[in-house]
Structure formats: C-alpha cells, structure tokens
Image: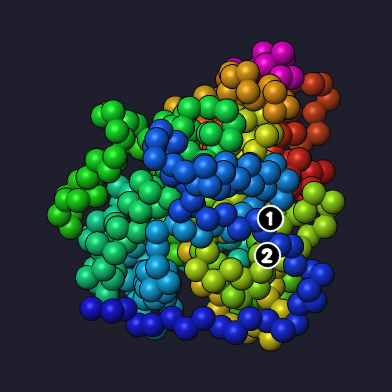
C-alpha cells in the first residue's frame, strides 16, 4: 500500500547565487569500523578525512549535508508522502485532528499542533501545522484512521534515524573530538547490553506499551501554509525567527521550497540550498555546551519563500534529538577538548553559585523563555547568566 504521492516543487529561480551558503557534504557510508584490521590505507585516509571535514563544518557554519545515510530516494519520497497524508488539507478531518491535538501546555508535542496556535504581539498568527511522534507515542491509537496502516513505516523511520544514522554520526563526532567511538552515543542511548544494538522497543503490536529508555527523540512532519495577505507584513515576511535548536542533534530532510537560512560566521543570513535525498544536519545548543564550543549550534530561521514559491505549502520532515534527560551539561572533562580550544560556557554561572543543569533542566528553562524579552537585572546572578546564554542567539528578543 502506498500513501498519496507528494510531488516536490521546482527549485526557485528568484534567489541570486550569492545569497546561498554551500554546506560541507559528508558521506556517512565512508565511516568504517575503527577497529577493522582489514581497512586499506586508502579507506583509512577517507575515514579520517570524513572525521576532519565533519568537525570543521560544525566548528564554522554549524550545518552539513549528509548522504550515505542508508535511506534510498524512494524511502525519503515515501516519508514526504506520509507527511502529506497527515497534514495535507482534506485528507484528515479537522474533527479528527482536534481529537489528536498535542497537549502542548503540559509539555508534550505528541500529536497535532494546529496552524494559528500561537498569536504574536503584532496581531498575526503562526502559519505552521505539524504532527509529532516521540518513540513511545508511535502507537496506532495516536494516529488518524487514514495513517494507521503505515504505523510500521513511522516506527521503522524512527529506528533507522536513532540506531543507524545518529549512532554513526555521533561516532564521527566522538572520534573527531578525541573521545572513544561511542562516548556521545552513550549520552543519548541507555546501553544495557555491550553492543548497544537495536533493543526492539518498537517491535511490539500496534497498541502495546513502548518501553523506550533512550533520548526523547522527536519526529516531526511539518507544513508551512502561506499566511493570509494581511499577515504577511505583520510578520515582516518571517515565518520562524532566528534561533538555535534545543538538545543535541537535528536532522532536516532537504526539500526544494526555499526559506531556511543560516547565520554565517560573518553575520550574514544566507539560504541553504536543496540537496536532493540529503539530510541537513545541525547541532543543538546542548551539544555546544558539553564540547565547549568546539561543536557549534548555528542560529537559523525560516523566512517567506521567494515569489515563484510563495503560494505553495512547504512540507518538511525534522528529527530532533536531545541528550538523555539526566545528562549533565558540563564541559566534557577530557584533555583533547582543551587541546581543541574548548571553553566552559558555565564558568561564570558556577562561580555565582549556580547548580549544574541537566539536559532536561535546560530544555524546560529554554521552553519558558521562547518568545520572551530579555529581563534587565540590577545585579549579576546565576539566573542572569542563564538568560545571557539563551539570548545570545536571539538578538531580536535581547532587550525589553
């Protein structure tokens, strides 16, 4: 059975070439087992180059375009088709979507977030609709009827991203930082057996309880609907303001409708071009914290698409990955990090008496600050330092 197809839009012809930034293309298939004695000198050289290039990209632009991830063009196309099934107008009724609304005020994104949920101070509403899974919510009872036949597609997609793509990418980053191969993986995955292979948590029946013990991964199918004309000027043509992501790693499946921009090291906003069948990978601020800025979280935003794409719905697939909730966001204590120039972002915070934050502590605090203005404080205190850390990448909110 196949879901209704999703046809990609043509690439925009309205963006000058100098408004793009080129990403480092990383072929994940080049990572071979570091302990494999059969590696030829050429294979070893290719693997080492892969590690160096990845680390360099995440130390500068903060984004890479990933290929060799183990998903075929057909696999990716099918996932976009499933996104269309969940979000395209007229396929799932508003009544059924309402029944499956996410409990956002309770801190959960699982289910539907409706378009227009957020109202801004300028009187406009957000134009974004999405449907989210956490691994432990990937159950038939949480899906609209039309999507239930594809439950194993959703589960398989989550599994491949967590157990295959994430683990390989984290191995590249760990080796580049001079750490053991699975050092970063163990901050995301509770390995109860030596190998840390797929533990089968998602292999049960359609509505069995899912015993997921690992990082709180979040799979999101998102549709940006063109806003009403009266809202365009209110929004200043900005759909999602500049920000860094929560957590550790973000996978974004490349699609051709322009709008995603990254803040380059020289302070310019530049478009990320479409890399067919690639995953656009960025890092969250928690990864920057534990590596002392050796790996950077890059500010990015979504602006209104150019004129030749402006009236099209923009479908995206995003996979957000945080650390395990109890991971402490302290600078990794390892000599190699110091050699790479790591700096402890928490130094002043701790000197003022602030307690070490866990991954979950920081995510909860950041969630409360989203969309707020910087509070001016008369004296230097731990809370003010945390505000500084949050607002450094959100200049539009930095002053009241």
The residue tagged 1 is 300
Q: Residue 273: x and y, percent?
A: 66, 69
What residue appears at the point 73 percent right and 27 percent down from the top-left corner?
Answer: 341
Quadrant where the C terminus lies? top right
Q: Which mark is residue 196?
A: none
**Whether residue 122 is situated above or below residue 346 in the rendered picture:** below
Whether tag 1 and tag 2 are in contact, CB under 8 A, the answer is yes
Disc 1/disc 2 C-alpha distance (Å): 10 Å
Residue at mark 2: 272
**Left or right of residue 132: residue 363:** right
- Residue 160: x and y, percent? 35, 53
SS of the residue under disc 2:
strand
**Corner quadrant of residue 376:** top right
Q: Is residue 104 visible?
A: no
Query: Is residue 348 located in the magenta-colored stretch of the structure?
Result: yes
Q: Check disc 2: other Cα within 10 Å, few if <14, some if 14-19, many if 20+.
A: many
Residue segment shown in magenta? 344-355
Q: Which quadrant of the figure contains the N terminus?
A: bottom left
Give 61 or 360, whichever is nearer the viewer: 61
């Amino acid at each position: 059975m196949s879901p209704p197809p999703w046809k990609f839009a043509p690439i925009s012809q309205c963006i000058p070439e100098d408004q793009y930034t080129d990403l480092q293309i990383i072929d994940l298939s080049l990572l071979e087992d570091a302990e494999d004695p059969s590696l030829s000198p050429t294979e070893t050289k290719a693997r080492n180059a892969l590690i160096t290039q990845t680390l360099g990209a995440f130390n500068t632009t903060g984004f890479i375009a990933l290929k060799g991830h183990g998903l075929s063009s057909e696999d990716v196309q099918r996932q976009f088709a499933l996104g269309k099934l969940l979000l395209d107008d007229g396929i799932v009724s508003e009544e059924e979507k309402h029944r499956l609304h996410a409990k956002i005020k309770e801190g959960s994104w699982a289910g539907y977030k409706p378009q227009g949920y957020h109202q801004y101070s300028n009187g406009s509403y957000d134009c974004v609709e999405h449907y989210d899974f956490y691994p432990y919510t990937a159950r038939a009872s949480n899906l609209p009827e039309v999507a239930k036949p594809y439950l194993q597609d959703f589960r398989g997609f989550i599994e491949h991203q967590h157990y295959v793509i994430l683990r390989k990418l984290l191995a590249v980053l760990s080796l580049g930082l001079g750490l053991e191969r699975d050092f970063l993986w163990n901050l995301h995955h509770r390995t109860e057996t030596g190998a840390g292979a797929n533990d089968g948590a998602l292999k049960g029946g359609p509505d069995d309880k899912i015993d997921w013990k690992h990082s709180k991964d979040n799979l999101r199918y998102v549709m940006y609907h063109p806003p009403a004309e009266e809202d365009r000027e209110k929004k200043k043509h900005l759909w999602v303001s500049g920000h860094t992501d929560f957590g550790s790693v973000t996978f974004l499946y490349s699609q051709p409708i322009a709008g995603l921009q990254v803040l380059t090291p020289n302070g310019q906003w530049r478009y990320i071009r479409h890399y067919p069948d690639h995953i656009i990978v960025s890092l969250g601020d928690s990864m920057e914290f534990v590596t002392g800025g050796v790996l950077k979280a890059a500010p990015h935003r979504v602006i209104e698409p150019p004129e030749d794409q402006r009236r099209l719905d923009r479908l995206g697939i995003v996979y957000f990955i945080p650390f395990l909730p109890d991971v402490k966001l302290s600078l990794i204590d390892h000599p190699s990090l110091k050699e790479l120039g790591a700096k402890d972002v928490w130094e002043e915070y701790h000197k003022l008496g602030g307690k070490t934050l866990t991954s979950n502590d920081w995510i909860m605090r950041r969630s409360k600050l989203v969309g707020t203005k910087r509070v001016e404080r008369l004296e230097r205190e731990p809370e003010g330092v945390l505000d500084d850390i949050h607002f450094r990448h959100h200049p539009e909110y930095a002053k009241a």
